[in-house]
Image (tube, rainbow, N blue to C red):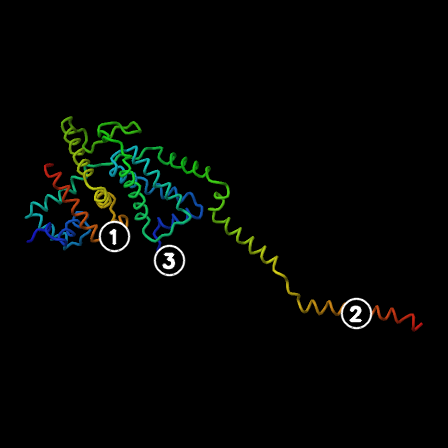
């Protein structure tokens, strides 16, 4: 068998074998190869050696320090920017603008209301005319 | 199926942070604090610096809350930020010279635990030498190879994720990883 080290597909098989992401057939193929190939066996053994590099636990006050930095950063921002990021504020502001716009649009008169108003004016005019005519009749 | 339904849980949490839900940020922090700090620790090999950098990572996450768009897996996005921060730190030479001794106490006053139960002094010395050699071998890798190995070996990211983090093609990542493991094999060949 040609050494897996020597071609791109073999390299992919070996790294997949290390991360255990190969299917059963792929794992078996590499298993068979590393029995015979010292170079590839050496490469596979690297994976185990890396386990020696343990990382320490995160210190207990990590979150507290982070939240303090967030609070300090928030406090430094101007009040209007602090408001701006809150999702409700732009919505309210947009609603207020739409409302204001609606108030400012000139209203077209309601024809029925206008007709009704005309009738009243006509009646009033008629009554006035009658008042004017009454003394003459008398 | 609606787009929101297929969003991974972390991405949903992040979107909720954007809506002002701070408890979702606390959940994300709880889930990813360890992996991010550990990744950065292995990158810069100094606990204090790694935690400072991790704080910077989570600050950037928090700052991005209102503009976040779930175009990739959350962990891919998070490790992209972490890698960027780590590479900048390495480039700027922020890392303190000289490694922390593996024998020193951690900042919470606890002595670092050794995996074997009650090892002899000799076993402990041998173990420490092995750890130092592995650390040095990883540190000797070029920064990009180092980041790829750490994400592949310790954080369980797949090729596609590592490729997205490092802005490379998947095939480039496979060959990068292979070269890195080859280099580590050469440096650690003497270790039993």
Percent of width and height locating residue B68 = 38, 49
Q: Nearer the viewer, residue A13 or B27?
A: A13
Cα separation between marks 2 and 3: 66 Å
Quarter of the figure with residue B31: top left
The answer as to whether the residues below labels 2 and 3 share one chain is: no
Residue farthest to the top, as pictured:
B121
Cα separation between marks 2 and 1: 85 Å
Q: Quick one: label 3, few (<14), some, or many (20+) residues within 10 Å? A: few
Percent of width and height locating residue A128 = 84, 68
Residue with the mark numbered 2 = A123
Mark 3: secondary structure:
helix
For the point 38% across and 48% down, the residue is: B14
The answer as to whether the residues below labels 1 and 3 share one chain is: yes
- Is there CB contact under 8 Å for labels 2 and 3? no
Mark 2: secondary structure:
helix
Residue with the mark numbered 1 = B160
Q: Nearer the viewer, residue B35 or B63?
A: B63
In the picture provided, is B122 more to the left or to the right than B73?
Answer: left
For the point 13% across and 38% down, the residue is: B188
Earlier residue among tags 1 and 3:
3
The answer for which chain carries disc 1 is B
Percent of width and height locating residue A61 = 36, 33
Q: Quick one: label 1, few (<14), some, or many (20+) residues within 10 Å? A: some
Q: Nearer the viewer, residue B123 or A81?
A: A81
């Amino acid at each position: 068998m040609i050494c897996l080290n020597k071609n791109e597909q073999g390299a992919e098989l070996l790294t997949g074998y290390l991360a255990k992401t190969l299917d059963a057939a792929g794992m078996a193929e590499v298993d068979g190869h590393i029995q015979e190939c010292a170079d590839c066996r050496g490469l596979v053994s690297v994976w185990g050696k890396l386990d020696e590099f343990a990382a320490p636990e995160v210190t207990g006050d990590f979150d507290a320090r982070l939240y303090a930095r967030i609070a300090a950063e928030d406090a430094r921002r101007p009040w209007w920017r602090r408001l701006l990021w809150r999702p409700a504020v732009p919505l309210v502001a947009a609603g207020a603008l739409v409302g204001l716009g609606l108030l400012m649009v000139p209203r077209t008169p309601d024809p029925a209301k206008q007709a009704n108003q005309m009738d009243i004016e006509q009646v009033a005019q008629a009554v006035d005319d009658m008042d004017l005519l009454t003394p003459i009749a008398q | 199926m609606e787009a929101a339904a297929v969003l991974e849980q972390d991405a949903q949490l992040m979107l909720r942070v954007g809506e002002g839900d701070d408890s979702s940020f606390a959940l994300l922090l709880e889930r990813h604090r360890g992996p991010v700090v550990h990744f950065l620790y292995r990158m810069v090999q100094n606990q204090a610096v790694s935690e400072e950098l991790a704080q910077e990572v989570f600050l950037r996450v928090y700052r991005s809350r209102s503009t976040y768009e779930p175009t990739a897996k959350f962990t891919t996005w998070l490790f992209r930020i972490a890698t960027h921060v780590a590479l900048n730190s390495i480039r700027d030479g922020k890392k303190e010279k000289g490694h922390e001794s593996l024998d020193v106490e951690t900042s919470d006053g606890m002595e670092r635990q050794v995996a074997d139960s009650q090892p002899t002094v000799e076993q402990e010395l041998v173990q420490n030498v092995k750890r130092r050699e592995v650390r040095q071998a990883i540190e000797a890798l070029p920064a990009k190879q180092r980041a790829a190995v750490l994400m592949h070996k310790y954080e369980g990211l797949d090729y596609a994720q590592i490729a997205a983090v490092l802005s490379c093609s998947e095939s480039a990542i496979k060959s990068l990883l292979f070269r890195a493991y080859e280099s580590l094999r050469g440096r650690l060949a003497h270790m039993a």
